[in-house]
Amino acid sequence: MPHLDAAYNLARWLVRSDDDAEEAVQEAFLRAYRFFGSFRGEDGKAWLLAIVRNTCYTLHTRSKAAGINEEFDEQIHQPETVAASSDGCFSRNPEEILIEHADRELINRALGELPLAFREVLVMRELEGLSYKEIAQIIDIPLGTVMSRLARGRHLLQRALVAHMNKESAK
């Protein structure tokens, strides 16, 4: 259970749907529980995220075969909390919160547009903080491929962010 948030986060970025991510995580945890006796590793998080990743791909393949193809439409409405300092004043003003929220939406939109191979390694490295070795183990690819996908993914993300920012400034 300590890796539930990481599992959901990865699934959410892979399947691009809250409901499908919940289904994938639930299925992955059932598989992990069923096969826990065969776990012979030292990194439970990497093992679990590999199961989540494989479950997401399996569910995606099933839905494609069934002809289900939903359009991705991400609306992020996360309530912002403003902490009061010891003197009772708020530490952040509404403008700062609005800018931070807009930046987060811009990054999420750009990340969501990346091809899956690059998006998954970026999510695992930048959002989940996994090491290159753990990512290679989860995806079952060589370490050099992880590094090249990260470099290329970061470059694509940067280009997407610049394109979005240029589009916004032209309005």
Image (cartoon, rainbow, N blue to C red):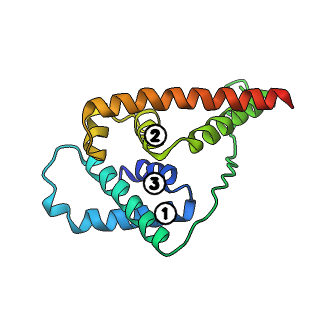
**Tag 3, which secondary structure?**
helix
Residue placed at 69% from the left, 46% from the top? 79
Report the residue marked by disc 3. Answer: 11
Residue 117 sits above or below residue 54 on the image: above
Viewer-closest of 44 and 168: 168
Count neighbours of disc 2 (C-alpha within 10 A) and say few if under 14, some if 14 to 19, many if 20 or more: some
| Tag 2–tag 1 contact (CB < 8 Å) | no
Mark in front: 2 vs 1:
2
SS at badge 2: helix
The amino acid type, in three-letter code, at marker 1 is Glu
Residue 63: x %, y % from top left: 48, 70
Q: Position of residue 110 (x, y in %)?
A: 62, 38
Quadrant of the image occupied by residue 80: top right
The 10 Å Cα crowd at callout 1, few under 14, some 14 to 19, many 20 or more, is some
Residue 143 appears in which quarter of the rendering?
top left
The earlier-in-sequence mark between 3 and 1 is: 3
Residue under label 1:
22
* Mark 3 and mark 1 residues within 8 Å of each other at the beta carbon: yes
**Is 5 above or below relative to 95?**
below
Question: In percent of the image, x 56 and y 31: which residue is there?
Answer: 157
Q: How many marks?
A: 3
The amino acid type of the residue labelled 2 equals Val
Which x, y percent locates residue 28? 35, 62
